């Protein structure tokens, strides 16, 4: 038995987020999910369930069949890209960690899931936590790590409990601890709860928080791979990235590359929210068009209203007008379309949505979540929030639009982390795509669609 | 103030999980919060002692994060997600209903100390919006009736 001492918190399971299937008549064929295959099953969170469905076979195979370096090469060749937002190749990231290190190496799992519109990792954490643990074992073996921390956002009380229970089971079953599965490999995993700060989803902010500090990001370089947690080499990977690993090991590179596009292989979990008829999770191969996803899985807009705008990759991704939504959902196509795939949080807005109000909402978020270290971010996020607020209230001036864009220019690329950029991206894109709506507010001296919006929001 | 026996055990175990005592600060604050129902000045002093850091560091940490229950928080901390995906699905109405029922605005606590109302940023419950977190628990897919039922069920 392990010496794992349980968290004294968390009693209640949250609502189980629905895994969506294509609506009838959409012409889209159902894709059998890889990562979300079991999250809707009874007892899917238990070790028994996991091992009876092939669980931990991949970890055994990885340790038995591969030398650590070969495993890194294997993951590199698979083309797996980070699912946290940046899409950085996972194997390449691992290869930056020095092979020989006098200091211990660490894995910090990013389970902070704080990008507005994103709720994918939560389902894995709560309903298939062993899938994550198996991914952690594979990553740690490849990089030579013996200590891993799962940094989970403070609000996920139940998720933290679910992970602790899974870890306890894994220790008891010999999948964690000393000499795991008789392989001679040692690995300790600890859950570390955050306490409510978006910035702790940024990798260096996360590490600061893990060290017992305010979650202030740090200047890179040095990158965490060289000098991260406790000033030691550290891999920071997102939950979904790690959850991919067992499947790639089990099914091989050809299978993995058979899904998605050349540069963005594999399947990805998307989170549908906002005004879509059906909200929930969708797992499909990368490359499906945004319109298809909204129509086939989201079922279009509530009350059969028209689609007006979509934020395709979490709130930091630039917004797209409805007419630009044919973009394929993969890392490169989204970038080329002037937005980003980000975390896969698809927030759709229908025709009655006031875009000034929507932007104001997002800017309140960034102003609140700026850690305050860097002047351009601390002052900039607050300033643009106030300007957009006054436009929404009908007190804006025409010169405000240029002022907003000028402030965004001063915020971008001038700070330790990208939170300032993440506030500037939506600001620029909302003004670019919906400039006439901002101008209408200023000319009318009020929000011209406020009434409709208020009504729509009340009945939604 | 000191930790109860089981929490002391958890604390000692925590120290074995990190190479530095300071790294146990966030979980130690959770232990104190869980035991006392809030994090007071005394609680912060205890955390400082347990993690071998100056009290000023603890205060810096506690005030940086929003999720700790500071002294004076009501028995039920009601956190309404107000970020865009929830706002698009009626978070505004949820908040107004709470203001009406509790008679307080965001950031305030009822005079009987039962409720503290807060507007918070995204709870990662966008697919089951609108959402309210009351203490540890998420309440999702909220409707006006459901919210009333939940509030009725909370004992004083």
Image (tube, rainbow, N blue to C red):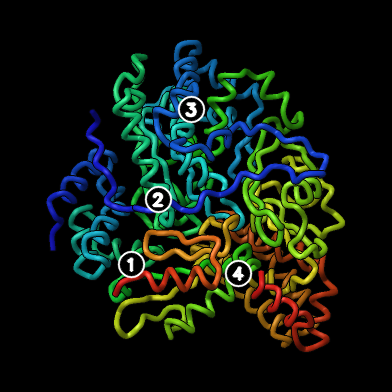
Quadrant holding the N terminus of chain A: top left
Using the image, name the chain to which the residue with label 1 belongs.
B
Crowding near the residue tagged with mark 2, few <14, some 14–19, many ≥20 C-alpha atoms within 10 Å: many
Q: Give the residue number, with chain letter if any, for mark 4.
A: A381
Do the residues at discs 1 and 2 belong to one chain? no
Tag 4, which secondary structure? Answer: helix
Q: Looking at the picture, tell me which residue is in the foreground, B24 or A244.
A: A244
Name the residue rendered at 49%, 29% in the picture.
A135
Q: Give the residue number, with chain letter if any, for mark 3.
A: A139
Where residue A88 appears, as percent x and y from the top left, is: 63, 37
Name the residue rendered at 55%, 61% in the picture.
B141
Q: Which mark is residue A158?
A: 2
In the current view of this chain or complex, which residue is farthest to the top? A65
Instruction: Decide if residue B84 is on the left or right side of residue A441.
Output: left
Residue A334 visible, this angle: no
Q: Is residue B105 above or below residue A239?
A: below
Crowding near the residue tagged with mark 1, few <14, some 14–19, many ≥20 C-alpha atoms within 10 Å: many
Q: Which of marks 4 and 3 is in front?
A: 3
Instruction: Decide if residue A238 is on the left or right side of residue A389.
Output: left
Q: In this view, does B95 lie above or below A237?
A: below
Residue A213 visible, this angle: yes
Using the image, name the chain to which the residue with label 4 belongs.
A
Tag 2, which secondary structure? Answer: helix
Q: Distance between the residues labelled 4 and 3?
A: 37 Å
Q: Distance between the residues labelled 3 and 2?
A: 25 Å
- Mark 3 or mark 2: name the one nearer the start of the chain: 3
Q: Nearer the viewer, mark 3 or mark 2?
A: 2
Q: Looking at the picture, tell me which residue is in the foreground, A74 or A60.
A: A60
Q: Residue B69 carries which label?
A: 1
């Amino acid at each position: 038995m392990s010496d794992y001492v349980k968290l004294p918190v968390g009693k209640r399971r949250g609502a189980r987020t629905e895994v969506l299937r294509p609506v009838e008549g959409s012409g889209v064929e159902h894709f059998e999910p890889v990562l979300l295959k079991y999250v809707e099953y009874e007892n899917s969170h238990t070790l028994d369930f996991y091992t009876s469905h092939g669980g931990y076979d991949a970890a055994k195979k990885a340790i038995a069949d591969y030398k650590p370096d070969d495993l890194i090469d294997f993951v590199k060749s698979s083309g797996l890209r980070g699912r946290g937002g940046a899409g950085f190749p996972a194997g390449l990231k691992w290869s930056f960690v020095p092979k020989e290190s006098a200091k211990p190496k660490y894995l910090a799992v990013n389970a902070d899931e704080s990008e507005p519109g994103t709720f994918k990792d939560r389902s894995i954490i709560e309903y298939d936590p062993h899938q994550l643990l198996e991914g952690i074992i594979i990553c740690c073996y490849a990089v030579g790590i013996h200590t891993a921390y799962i940094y989970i956002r403070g609000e996920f009380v139940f998720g933290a409990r679910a992970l602790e229970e899974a870890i306890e089971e894994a220790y008891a079953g010999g999948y964690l601890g000393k000499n795991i599965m008789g392989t001679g490999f040692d690995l300790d995993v600890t859950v570390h709860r955050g306490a409510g700060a978006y910035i702790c989803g940024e990798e260096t902010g996360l590490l600061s928080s893990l060290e017992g500090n305010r979650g202030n990001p740090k200047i890179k370089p040095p990158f965490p791979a060289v000098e991260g947690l406790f000033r030691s080499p550290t891999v920071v990977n997102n939950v979904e990235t790690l959850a991919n690993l067992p499947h790639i090991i089990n099914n091989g590179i050809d299978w993995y590359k058979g899904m998605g596009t050349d540069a963005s292989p594999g399947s990805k979990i998307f989170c549908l929210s906002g005004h879509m008829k059906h909200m929930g999770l969708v797992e499909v191969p990368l490359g499906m068009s945004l319109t298809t996803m909204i129509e086939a899985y989201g079922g279009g807009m509530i009350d059969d209203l028209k689609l007006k705008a979509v934020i395709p990759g979490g709130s930091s991704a630039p917004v797209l007008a409805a007419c630009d939504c044919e973009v394929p959902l993969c890392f490169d196509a989204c970038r080329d379309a002037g937005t980003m795939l980000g975390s896969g949080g698809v927030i759709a807005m229908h025709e009655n949505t006031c875009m000034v109000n929507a932007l104001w909402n997002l800017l309140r978020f960034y102003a609140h979540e700026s850690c305050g270290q860097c002047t351009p971010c601390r002052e900039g996020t607050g300033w643009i929030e106030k300007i957009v607020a006054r436009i929404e209230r009908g007190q804006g001036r025409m010169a405000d639009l240029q002022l907003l864009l000028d402030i965004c220019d001063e915020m971008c690329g001038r700070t330790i982390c990208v939170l300032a950029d993440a506030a500037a991206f939506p600001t620029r894109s909302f003004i670019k795509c919906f400039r006439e709506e901002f101008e209408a507010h200023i000319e009318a001296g009020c929000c011209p669609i406020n009434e409709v919006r208020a009504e729509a929001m009340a009945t939604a | 103030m000191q930790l109860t026996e089981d929490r002391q055990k958890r604390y000692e175990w925590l120290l074995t999980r990190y190479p530095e005592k300071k790294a146990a600060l966030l979980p130690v604050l959770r232990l104190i919060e869980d035991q006392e129902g809030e994090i007071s000045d005394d609680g912060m002093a205890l955390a400082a002692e347990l993690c071998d850091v100056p009290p000023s560091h603890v205060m810096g940490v506690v005030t940086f994060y929003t999720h700790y229950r500071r002294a004076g928080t009501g028995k039920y901390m009601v956190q309404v997600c107000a970020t865009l995906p929830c706002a698009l699905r009626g978070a505004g109405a949820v908040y107004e209903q709470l203001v009406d029922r509790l008679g307080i605005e965001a950031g305030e606590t009822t005079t009987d100390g039962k409720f503290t109302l807060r507007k918070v940023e995204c709870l990662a419950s966008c697919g089951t919006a609108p959402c309210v977190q009351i203490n540890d628990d998420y309440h999702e897919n909220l409707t006006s009736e459901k919210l009333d039922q939940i509030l009725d069920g909370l004992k004083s």
